Amino acid sequence: MILLTVFICLVYTFLIINLMKHWEEIPAVNIPEEYQAKIKLSVVIIARNEEGNIKKCIQSILDNDFPISSYEIIVVDDHSEDTTIQEIEGFANERIRVLHLGNFLKDGKTNAFKKAGIQYALQNAKYNHIIHTDADCVVPTNWLRITAWNFKKGTKLQAGPVGFSPVHSFLSWFQQLDMYTLMASTNAGIRSQNWYLANGANLAYAKSSLPQDIYKESNRYASGDDVYLINRFAENHGDEIVFESLIPIRTTPIENWKSFINQRKRWAGKNRQLAKGKMKNILIIPVIANLWVFILLLCIPIIPSITLGLFAFYLLTKLMVDYVLLEYMQRKTRPKEKNKHFLLAFLMYPFYFLLVGFLSLVSPSYQWKARKVQ
């Protein structure tokens, strides 16, 4: 047991060091001042019941330092039951188009509404280069310009970071710390070309490079549009995918634990698609690392002379390794803020990690945006 504990510590530490190493390898973006974007972009937003967010989202896009004639905004309304449409119409901008998902889903039967919305948007997009965000997000002012520049350099798909704002409560910080790990993993997988993750709130690609029937195999899952797309894309264009760290998108953190668990169950549904190839080998490391906490804890009453000290050693090692990663990501992405609630989040994380994984297997259905899906 001693050797196995040390081995797990070493493997986990190596993984964390590898994540930070790949972040250091992200190249700087140097756009010439005289650069005039010739690439045109279709911005795609799938919205459902977003009356409190959609105006801020669209306004942040319109505030970009990018010619208004070089992009369009397509909002696909997913059967909203509030004033989302009226909020969009308030802009009175001819570059903003609203599509109603009900016109695409004639019979209304699907479990993957967002994927259907994306397919509908792609059918109606004027331009070849597509960039996605979510209706509850705010984008930075350089979002479109840097994306167009990366496409000009030959990129076929671009993933980008997502963070939370404001982050004041423990729950909001827990989400932010969790997102740091996910963003570091996303970048490392893309740069090493060993696994591919993405967040649909910050994703861009060339439509002409998409495989046919992009979501055919994954339509039975409500979530995973982003992860499935990037993995299908990587089959033919793995060396033309980049993670762009300079365009972080901000979204509002979830305000209660029930909704948070439902969201993470939705995200965990992607694991059914991820459990293939090299990603399966990477996923097993954090699973074992968090599960080992409970195994050692359960062994303490049986052989306390060995496992009590071993548990303390393992927990302290994991605490230091996790802190180094999260503090590093904090400095790299949000240097003006102080890393808060780390210790409590660290103690809770193994319970949360295994609970969400367990619930996603035994109870795959969940409530999301007033709709029961699985």
Image: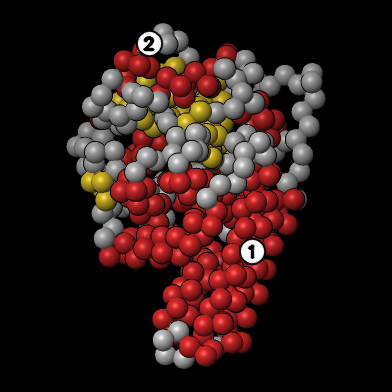
Q: Quadrant of the N terminus?
A: bottom right
Where residue 304 appears, as percent x and y from the top left, is 48, 88
Colour option used: secondary structure
Three-letter residue code for mark 1: Val
Residue 201 higher or lower than 217, as above or below: above
State the image coordinates of residue 281 (x, y, percent, origin top left): 54, 70
Q: Which residue is more in the foreground, 174 or 131?
A: 174
Residue under numbered circle 2? 90
Tell me the crowding category of disc 1: few under 14, some 14 to 19, or many 20 or more residues within 10 angstroms, Cα based: some
Proximity of marks 1 and 2: CB atoms separated by less than 8 Å: no
At horizontal 60% and vertical 60% (from top left) the residue drawn is 322
Label 1, label 2: how many angstroms apart (C-alpha)? 49 Å
The dot on residue 321 is: 1
Q: Amino acid at mark 2?
A: Gly
On the question of residue 81 being in view, the answer is yes
Query: Dot 2: what SS?
Result: loop
Give the number of the disc on residue 369.
none
| Figure check: 336 above or below 328 | above
Q: Is residue 16 above or below residue 65?
A: below
Task: Report the number of discs.
Answer: 2
Q: Residue at x 36, y 24 (%)?
A: 52
